[in-house]
Image: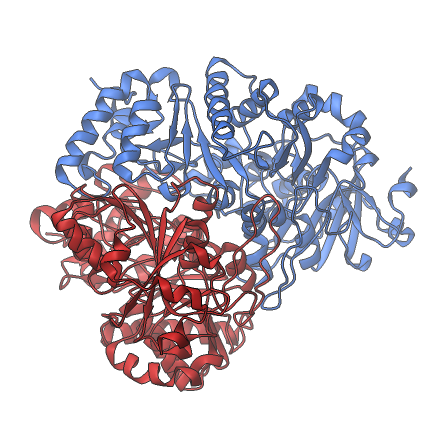
Chain colours: A red, B blue
């Protein structure tokens, strides 16, 4: 079986234990690991590294595609291995270390990390650790459930460690499309012109002599921790569907819509799930994470093709999909995140992008990342790549959080990830604000009327009315702009007295 | 002479006065006019329209490429013609009306306006008014000193009015490259692969029967109002040059650098001017506005090619360049702003982008537009298109304004146009902050150490130190974040007591 998976035979000599492989990683190194939204991360080597660090401390810069599963970010942070972390994470333990200033987190647009590596504007990757389902006859690496930044890490690093995961189905082979843009200033157009364009290789092409170690693992990907749809997420999906149906009636879209992107998480997943009961058909996705809803839409016959950079499913959906992967294969493609999130391709394809806001303000600026303006949740991820270049940029959130103590619609966001220029449509369970072609004062009227929880609406209107008296293109009462956040901190609620 | 300029002869019948042409513009219409950074705007028809409005009031939505010269925005605003304005302006009179809430200003990334028009996400252009240097044998329109959005306006509008400007040199013909991306979802890659790639036509191709009127004008473009270099701008240029020379020494760039983009205005122009006395050579520009410095660099032999969407020069430089345009022609190309500012092309070419900040904060977020967080100056313009997709995104500003009463480096920017993800290098006359690969806390240290005026440094450090005690990935004292702006409003200075 191992010989079927390591088809470039000289590499059979490189089989070692996770501990032996981890020994290649030295203090101070930059390590590029596979893994994107808890899918396809290297599992055994980082665990061995954390174990070793308990007796022999070391610190590394850890770069990945996006978030890791199997509590790896927690384990590495707790073992004080992670000194610097790039470009995304979503682990509560690591988050704590980041907010305490113990780990330096470089939060990046997910399409940009390897661009900066390639131009040496980030320190080089010393070693890459890549989960694979197989090594081809030519020594190429076949990734597993994500591509992320794995291809560029392997190409740019001096040394590569492969984790051959025997629990990942061999039917994954053929799913990947590895295309790396040529170097500037002589770069050619990226030839992706539809979500299903195949433009690269089904493996990561590297000289096999760069592979210094191969570790066998059987650990599964972690399952997604998304919640099932509830009344609020159903209401959000309903508002958005109604809006899109009207766009079709107005002749601005067809029932195939435009290719869809949806951010990771419960709300975006629920919105896509809601598309099952709509008149839309022959839908396509060009997204980063393919979640449960992608497969539900394929099963329902609504979705004909989905391109992403990873597959991240609930435990139940994994059990259903993995054995039948060969059947899904002609509907799916996994690409490097540089390509799934590339401004060039996003703008060309004309995506309808659905991402989640932590909070937004009366002018439509969005905070996706910082609680109270200061404490990092996960990171900006791909939301900036998509929102900026979208055909239509949609942000969704519930209008309140913490049993109503927090309004997701505030006078001014405490941190800006997406400016009003990049937000076309905002949706809460209360309703939908269509901001296209509106000036800030008009945006405020539409947002306050349509998106705000009843308990906060009058207070928000009052803030706006007083702001307008001071004038300006984007009126504010600057000294009160964060008073709701101060209320929350001091009184436990944003709610007006 | 007129017959040389109107080469599709049936159109000679369409010659009318500006008043007659303006009569096609009715109350409530959306009018798309040529003009980008005070260059190549239609001049006679909007003046006639303002004149008519004094006796017969009407209101329009005015769309352009960018800002207009010849006080047109002022005149139209004062005549209460402009109800809505898209996507950029820089006129003090119009600005006043915008900040008073009398004119609704939709401030957009300059690459996006025609994309939204094409997909009917903005109300359609009823009539286009385009300044031209000639009409070709086939009825195509040859623009003058800017392309801006003129091509798409003319293609999308029902009716087109041409202003044939006899004062614009006929040698402009052949300078333009009109390429319009195909409609989605079947769009092909934009074939621009170098700044000098010629991919389109030298005129705007429209059915000549759409031209309902031709007006002859002789008004000149307004000259640019940039200030000459001073000690501070020379210091900024010096810091940036030193930094870039070091990038070359480190092997991250060659002496040709990467294609350059520079925002409009005194500081960016002075920085480019400063490149004359550097070891860089064989430079190219892929920018939106070609200013005095572009021609100085061509004259000095440093710059071999410049692509832009407009030519905006000082009075002196106009006198020098316009008669010799034929000589400069093989160094120049003017494109639609959708192409000059297109994310696809910017990212592909790998631009070094130099734009001006109004203020930036200790984490590198940039405010380019809003004084005191509320009052619009000009608009975001192309800075977002460029900064987001740059090889290297540089923002420049003087460290203080109003004789030191305002610090351009503040605890938190009062309005965010560019987030920390999109700012690599910040430069003031004090020094340069290289933020690449740094986490927010590290960015703060570098910015406070290098960019801040002495009078504000301790106060900024004190703010940061107190913020860090509260923890967080991006520490802030939220209730004090805008205290410097409040000081300025209440006491006339941000300076600590």
The quadrant of the picture occupied by the C terminus of chain B is top left
Task: Identify which residue is drawn at 57% across, 36% down.
Answer: B258
A120 or B290: nearer the viewer: A120
Task: Identify which residue is drawn at 13% across, 58% down.
Answer: A405
The quadrant of the picture occupied by the N terminus of chain B is top right
Tell me if A389 is positioned left or right of A467 in this view: right
Tell me if B94 is positioned left or right of A487 in this view: right
A284 or A483: nearer the viewer: A284
Q: Position of residue A351 (x, y in %)?
A: 49, 65
Q: Position of residue B55 (x, y in %)?
A: 63, 42
Splitting the image into 4 quarters, where does residue B225 fall?
top right
A307 or A380: nearer the viewer: A307
Q: Position of residue A122 (x, y in %)?
A: 39, 41
The relative height of residue B306 versus residue B293 in the rendered view (above or below) is below
Tell me if B52 is positioned left or right of B161 in this view: left
Q: Position of residue B374 (x, y in %)?
A: 36, 38
The relative height of residue B194 versus residue A427 in the rendered view (above or below) is above
Task: Identify which residue is drawn at 39% across, 21% down.
Answer: B431
């Amino acid at each position: 079986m191992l010989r079927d998976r390591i088809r470039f035979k000289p590499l059979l000599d490189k089989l070692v234990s996770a501990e032996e492989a981890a020994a290649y990683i030295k203090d101070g190194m930059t390590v590029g690991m596979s893994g994107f939204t808890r899918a396809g991360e290297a599992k055994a080597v980082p665990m061995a590294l954390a174990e070793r660090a308990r007796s022999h401390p070391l610190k590394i810069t850890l770069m990945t595609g996006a978030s890791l599963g199997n509590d790896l970010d927690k384990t590495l942070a707790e073992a004080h291995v992670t000194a610097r972390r790039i470009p995304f994470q979503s682990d509560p333990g690591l988050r704590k270390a980041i907010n305490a200033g113990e780990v330096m987190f470089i939060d990046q647009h997910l399409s940009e990390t390897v661009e900066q590596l390639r131009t040496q504007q980030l320190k080089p990757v010393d070693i890459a650790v890549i989960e694979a389902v197989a090594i081809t006859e030519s020594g190429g690496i076949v990734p597993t459930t994500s591509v992320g930044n794995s291809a560029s890490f392997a190409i740019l690093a001096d040394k590569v460690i492969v984790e051959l995961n025997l629990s990942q189905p061999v039917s994954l082979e053929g799913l990947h499309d590895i295309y790396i843009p040529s170097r500037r200033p002589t770069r050619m157009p990226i030839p992706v012109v539809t979500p299903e364009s195949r433009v690269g290789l089904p493996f990561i092409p590297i000289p096999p002599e760069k592979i210094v170690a191969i570790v066998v693992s059987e650990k599964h990907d972690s399952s997604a921790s998304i919640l099932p749809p509830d009344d609020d997420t159903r209401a959000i999906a309903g508002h958005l569907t109604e809006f899109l149906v009207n766009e079709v009636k107005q002749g601005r879209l067809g029932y195939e819509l435009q290719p869809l992107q949806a951010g990771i998480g419960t709300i975006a997943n629920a919105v896509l799930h809601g598309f099952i009961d709509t008149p839309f058909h022959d839908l396509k996705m060009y997204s980063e994470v393919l979640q449960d809803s992608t497969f539900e839409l394929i099963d329902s016959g609504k979705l004909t093709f989905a391109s992403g950079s990873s597959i991240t499913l609930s435990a139940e959906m994994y059990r259903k999909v993995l054995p039948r992967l060969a059947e899904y294969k002609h509907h799916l493609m996994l690409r490097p995140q540089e390509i799934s999130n590339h401004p060039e391709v996003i703008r060309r394809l004309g995506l309808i992008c659905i991402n989640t806001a932590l909070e937004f303000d009366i002018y439509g600026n969005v905070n996706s990342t910082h609680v109270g303006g200061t404490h990092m949740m996960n990171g900006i991820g791909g939301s900036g790549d998509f929102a900026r270049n979208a055909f239509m940029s949609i942000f969704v959130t519930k209008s309140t959080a913490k049993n109503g103590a927090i309004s997701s619609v505030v006078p001014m966001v405490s941190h800006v990830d997406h400016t009003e220029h990049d937000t076309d449509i905002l949706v809460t369970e209360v309703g939908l604000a269509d901001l296209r072609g509106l000036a800030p004062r008009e945006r405020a009227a539409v947002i306050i009327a349509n998106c705000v929880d009843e308990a906060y609406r009058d207070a928000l209107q009052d803030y706006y009315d007083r702001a307008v008296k001071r004038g300006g293109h984007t009126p504010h009462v600057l000294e009160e702009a964060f008073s709701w956040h101060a209320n929350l901190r001091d009184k436990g609620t944003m709610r007006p007295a």
